[in-house]
Amino acid sequence: MVRLTPTRLLSAAVLTFSFIAVTLVSRRLFGERGYDILHERPPPARSRLPNQEVPLGVECSPFVGGVMEDVTIVLKMGAAEVASKLPAYLNRLGRCKQDLLLFSDRKEQRNGFDIYDALANIRDEYKYQNPDFDVYEKIRDTTGPLEKSAEGWRLDKYKFLPMMELTAHMRPESRWFVFVELDTYVNWDNLYRFLINFNPKQPYYFGSPVWPPKKTIFAHGGSGFVLSRGAINKLVARGRMFAENQHFPGTHLFGKNVASQCCGDEILGQVLKECGVGIKGYWPMFNGEKPTTMRFDHEQWCEAIITMHHLQHDDFVALQRWEGDRPHPSKPLTFEELFGYIEPYLTSQTDDWSNMSEDVTLGKGDPAGISFDTCFAACLKDTKCMQYEHFGDTCKLSHSIRLGHQHGPEGATRWTSGWVKNRIEAFKAARSPCHGAHFVHPNP
């Protein structure tokens, strides 16, 4: 048991004061990203009745209120995921009777839903002597479950552009299109609160931006992205330049050499830019992390959460259980509140654990790498350090708060992580409570 001597109490007070001072000075010197406050109870859209009640914070909200009837959710997956992951996803999502469109690389049915082959109409010229399509015929000819493979993943980038034309063709009346994957979490209440601010007739492309050097900025696919009717109409109009049959969608790749590029979300961003539709980046509201790997810091605290990524089945189940116990479920979910999901697990020392500290690395030859205690001492010397991680002869420090994941020994090397609890409390004291959920201004 640690004795709280006067010296230790004084040290803790000094550390807390220093952290608050650094936080306040940083705000004044560098400013913060602009934001508006997300409406807890948005006014109805012009097409709705003014007295229409929209239930929020309950199961299947806001779909039960009928205010998302003009939103199509487009779920993209690989054929190998249909049997292993789709049923559980549909059990969580499909029971709410949303308008779902499911795309894979093989046509089939599952749980009463039709799954469309996004590549079914692609012209042969794109497949001929293209090794990426070697596995395609095998996938289509196999009737049973498939195993996930690297070859199947190579087909993924070809699905994006045909999927856009097919979606527009199959849902001519929809006003918004939300594109997600099987490991994408969506807070539907916050998405509704977000979309109500925009006119779907205008060309909008929302998501979490990826900034490749000297290339087009695009929305990360796994984090989920949104296209308005105005945007998808522009895309379809451009597609007519490359289509042989104007009434047969999904036959071409918009003149792009997809084989030579990395990823379908990046290529889609390029085509949209050529249509005059640039991304409006709403990170961190559209987010590429899950709760256990999320960075909690000055950029991710009062902001509203719309999406998260990389959630597996157990993550969805645990998060759904936690959401069911929220004290005020009708309020917008923010990072501040989500922090309560991981906070109970933050301790002064956790063995066989990586908390994903990566802002400062003190390697071989630095005294901080000698032991877990010297790593802790190095963290205390860094006034911005919130947590630390030691393994082998390496010490890593982080200026954000993350939970991380279990990391077993590798030979004689063990991973041990710790969090500076008084600094975390000081961080919370400097920023909480949030006075409304922040709806950040777009970047770009």
Image (cartoon, rainbow, N blue to C red):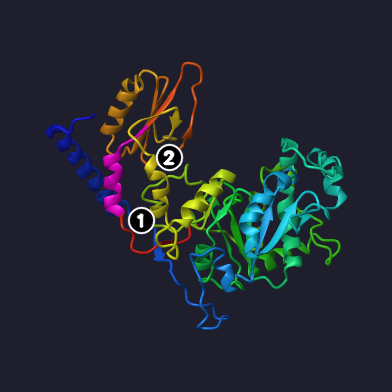
Q: Which residue is mark 2?
A: 403
Q: Is residue 424 magenta?
A: yes
Q: Residue at x 22, y 39 (%)?
A: 15
Position above or below: 79 against 170: above
Report how far apart the C-alphas of labels 1 and 2 lie in the structure: 25 Å
Position above or below: 18 against 375: below
For the view shown, which residue lies furthest in the left direction? 6
Position above or below: 5 against 304: above
For the view shown, which residue lies furthest in the top direction? 412
Identify which residue, 181 or 32, lies in the foreground.
181
Q: Residue at x 71, y 60 (%)?
A: 101
Asked if residue 383 lies left or right of residue 413, the reply is left
Q: Which residue is mark 1?
A: 32
Near mark 2 (Cα within 10 A), the count class, few <14, some 14-19 or many ≥20, is many
Residue 337's mark? none
Q: Residue at x 50, y 26 (%)?
A: 408
Q: Chief secondary structure of the magenta span? A: helix
Identify which residue, 210 or 317, lies in the foreground.
317
- Residue 74 in percent (x, y) is at 67, 59
Near mark 1 (Cα within 10 A), the count class, few <14, some 14-19 or many ≥20, is few
- Residue range highlighted in magenta: 418-431
Asked if residue 49 lies left or right of residue 374, the reply is right
- Residue 28 in percent (x, y) is at 27, 54
Q: Is residue 230 magenta?
A: no
Residue 316 visible in the picture: yes
